[in-house]
Image (cartoon, rainbow, N blue to C red):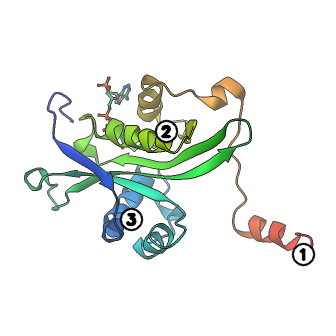
Amino acid sequence: MVDTNFKMSFKVRAAKKEDCKDISRMIMELAVYEKMPDQVNISHKELERDGFSPNPFYECLIAEVSDENKTKDGYTIVGYALYFYTYSTWKGRSVFMEDLYVMPDFRGKGIGKGLMAKVAQIGVEKQCVRLQFSVLEWNKPSLDFYVAKGAEDLTAKEGWHFFRFDGQALHQLAKEAPED
Ligand SMILES: CC(C)(COP(=O)(O)OP(=O)(O)OC[C@H]1O[C@@H](n2cnc3c(N)ncnc32)[C@H](O)[C@@H]1OP(=O)(O)O)[C@@H](O)C(=O)NCCC(=O)NCCS
């Protein structure tokens, strides 16, 4: 049971390359929570390459607590928000938050809001006009969290569906591209 009255101090900072093992650990924890751990096919190596080389594909913030509040396994990095920039042809610069996660014992203490607010601040500083993300339909606590913070459910409001080409379908499509 999370004691929501107990406020714990935490710091939100930009992730560094050496944080990728912790990010990778929490990506798996989030995938377990989302009931799809077998879909994770990425390790800290790809995270290091894709986030910490020239022209990175993503940016990441981590939430860190003091040593005295570390987890029983000794972790002080207890949450993360991974995001990247996209573009709306209707509105312009946008930021997409791919993951937001706080470890169970640290929820209800303002850490998730702190991470998301920092993503918003970074986006606004870059003149982004939207912060978008997707949420699984059954994830009611998180849906409620986002709505409570002022986000709109676009599927309910405008009927958008979230699509993907993956694996064989993606490769098949790529083969059908016209010659340069
Ligand atoms: C969703 C999640 C990131 C929220 O982080 P958190 O640290 O627990 O939330 P916070 O303590 O920062 O919540 C801050 C605010 O949101 C409100 N809030 C939190 N959970 C809420 C809920 N289920 N319903 C309504 N409001 C909620 C709090 O009351 C608080 O409000 P305040 O700012 O007015 O005081 C976290 O619970 C989590 O990691 N969940 C599991 C993974 C997940 O679902 N991630 C999102 C995938 S889309």
Residue 166, image x and y in percent?
A: 69, 63
Residue 3, image x and y in percent?
A: 17, 32
* SS class, disc 1: loop
C-alpha separation, residue under disc 2 versus residue under disc 1? 38 Å
Type of the residue with mark 1: Asp
Residue 115, image x and y in percent?
A: 35, 43
User: Taking 33 as reference, is 139 above or below it?
Assistant: above
User: Taking 7 as reference, is 77 above or below it?
Assistant: below
N-terminal of the two: label 3 or label 2? 3
Residue 92, image x and y in percent?
A: 67, 41
Query: Which label sits on residue 180?
Result: 1
Most foreground residue, 112 or 123: 123
**Quadrant of the frame with the N terminus:** top left
* SS class, disc 2: helix
Give the residue at x 83% y 66%.
Answer: 173
Left or right, 104 with respect to 131, comes to: left
Pair 3/2: label in front: 2
Give the residue at x 17% y 61%.
Answer: 73
* Residue on which the image places disc 2: 124
Q: Quadrant of ligand 1?
A: top left
Query: Which label sits on residue 24?
Result: 3
Type of the residue with mark 2: Val
Most foreground residue, 168 or 79: 79
N-terminal of the two: label 2 or label 1? 2
Q: Residue furthest right?
A: 178
Pair 2/1: label in front: 2
Is the residue marked by circle 3 packed among few (<14), some (14-19), or many (20+) residues within 10 Å? some
N-terminal of the two: label 1 or label 3? 3
* SS class, disc 3: helix
Type of the residue with mark 3: Ser
Q: How many marks?
A: 3
